[in-house]
Image (cartoon, helix red, strand yellow):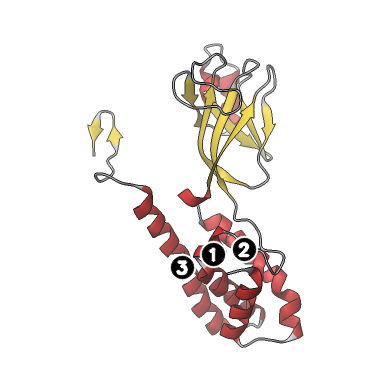
Amino acid sequence: MNYSEIKKAAQSYTDRYDEEMKTSMPAFVRVVESKINTALKTGEQSVRAQIYLENGQELYGLPSDWGGFRDVEIVKKGSANVNVANAQSGFGGKTLTYASPEYMNQLKRRQDGWHQAYYTVIANQIQVAPPADGDILEVVYFQNVPPLVEDTDSNWLSEKHPDVYIFGISAEINAFAKDGEAFAAYDNRFKESLNDIVVDDQITRWSGPSLRTEVDGLIV
């Protein structure tokens, strides 16, 4: 469903066709999309990107649609499987571990090179240890849901799960109208729709035997 169809559906559910509601609709949608971006971190939102690093530079801007990291790896210059146009992780790469900014500063003061195994995020920038020219930061991040602005706009969520938008907008309309009972009903349906997506993602993302966790050599 596109933006226009979703708005019409929300109007039908709430029986609100007045001008005040139409004027406020863009604000309702932004609120709903903010809640969606906070709640959803699914495989369908995963995007791969490469950042080419420079010697002595530690901070690099995050993608504008960044919604959180899923994996961060540094691929060293000269690795056998690094292609200039498209970095590939594997031999020569190192998966980085998130550290708080304070811990990152402590690590940088050490002389044993351990700071090179960590990254942190500060003010919409990713910080890594000073790499050599030509190293590549290969990241997989969760992409925020592309916003609906024009009536013809759609995105993967509005096409596959329009109920999330419809029930979320319906909840905001009733919150605006100060109808607590109707808000609670639609908000519950909104949250149920989000949960259905999370459960579906967990089922479809994995194949093979049940997932197992290994802790200090003990498989649970």
Question: On the image, which quarter does residue 17 sit in?
Answer: bottom right
| Kind of residue at disc 3 | Ser
Left or right of 25? Residue 159 is left
Q: Circle 3 is placed at which residue position?
A: 193
Front residue of 131/146: it is: 146
What's the CA distance linking mark 1 and mark 3?
14 Å
Give neighbour class at mark 2: few <14, some 14-19, many 20+ (Cα, 10 Å).
many
Residue in the image at 64% along x and 26% along y: 52
Residue 159 is marked as: 1
Number of numbered discs present?
A: 3
Residue in the image at 60% along x and 20% along y: 135
- SS category of the residue bearing label 2: loop
Task: Confirm or deny contact between disc 1 and disc 3 (CB under 8 A).
Answer: no
Question: On the image, which quarter does residue 36 sit in?
Answer: bottom right
Front residue of 1/21: it is: 1
- Which mark sits nearer the N-terminus, 1 or 3? 1
Task: Confirm or deny contact between disc 2 and disc 1 (CB under 8 A).
Answer: yes
Q: Give how far across and how far down residue 155 sits, in percent.
A: 59, 60
Residue 154 is marked as: 2
Give neighbour class at mark 3: few <14, some 14-19, many 20+ (Cα, 10 Å).
some
Q: Give how far across and how far down residue 58 sits, in percent.
A: 67, 24
- SS category of the residue bearing label 1: helix
